[in-house]
Amino acid sequence: MKVRGGCHCGAVRFEVEVAADEASLLDCNCSICSMTGYLHLIVPHQRFRLLAGEAALEEYRFGTGAARHLFCRTCGVKSFYQPRSHPDAWSINFRCLDPGHGLEPAVRRFDGRNWEAARGQL
């Protein structure tokens, strides 16, 4: 199924293809995810399409610099980004999907504060 989402102000819009029965979320407790309440829906690059807002995206990197945290420069919302854990996929913030998508994914906790030790759980 195709679902859409984006940032708070609407400048950034995207569409992703998700199999309803395969959708699962990661609830990470790392410093940035716990502060922002990010719920990770991992989607392969080929199932993601940016519809609007490429010019509105700003990038932030920290720690190893491997993850490309992308956020809207107008409203500050990070609706998707390139995680270091899944270099061939985007992490979509489940909370940024448009209402009415019908997905009811299972949520799995991930110990991102101890990323090196926990990455084998991915």
Image: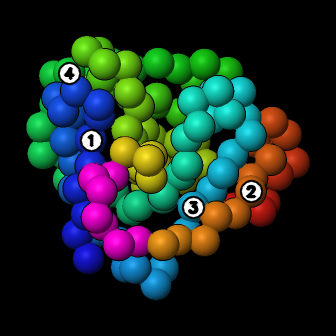
Determine which of the numbered discs, if any, sits on residue 6 in the image. Answer: 1
Asked whether 66 or 28 is in front, the reply is 28
User: N-terminal of the two: label 2 or label 3?
Assistant: 3
Q: Secondary structure at mark 2?
A: strand
Q: Residue at x 37, y 79 (%)?
A: 19
Mark earlier in primary sequence (2, 1): 1
In this figure, which residue is indicated by the disc labeled 4? 56
**Spatial separation of the CA atoms under disc 1 and disc 3:** 17 Å
Using residue 22 as the reference point, say whether residue 1 is left or right of it: left
Which x, y percent locates residue 18? Answer: 35, 72
Residue at which label 3 appears: 25
The residue drawn where x is 82% and y is 52% is 118
The quadrant in which residue 52 appears is top left
Dot 1: few (<14), some (14–19), or many (≥20) neighbours within 10 Å?
many
For residue 1, what is the image quadrant? bottom left
What residue sits right under mark 2 in the picture?
109
Neighbour tally class for label 2: few under 14, some 14-19, many 20 plus, Cα within 10 Å: few
Label 1: which secondary element: strand
- In the rendered structure, which amino acid carries the disc numbered 1? Gly
Q: Position of residue 87 (x, y in %)?
A: 50, 49
Give the magenta range: 97-103
Q: CA distance from mark 4 to mark 3?
A: 26 Å
Residue furthest to the top = 74
> Which quarter of the image is occupied by the C terminus?
bottom right
Can you tell which of label 4 and label 1 is closer to the viewer?
Answer: 1
Residue sitting at x 64%, y 27%: 35
Q: Nearer the viewer, residue 24 or 48?
A: 24
Kind of residue at badge 4:
Ala
Q: CA distance from mark 2 to mark 3?
A: 8 Å
**In terms of secondary structure, where does tag 3 sit?**
strand
The kind of secondary structure element at disc 4 is helix
How far across and how far down the image is residue 113, in percent? Answer: 81, 36
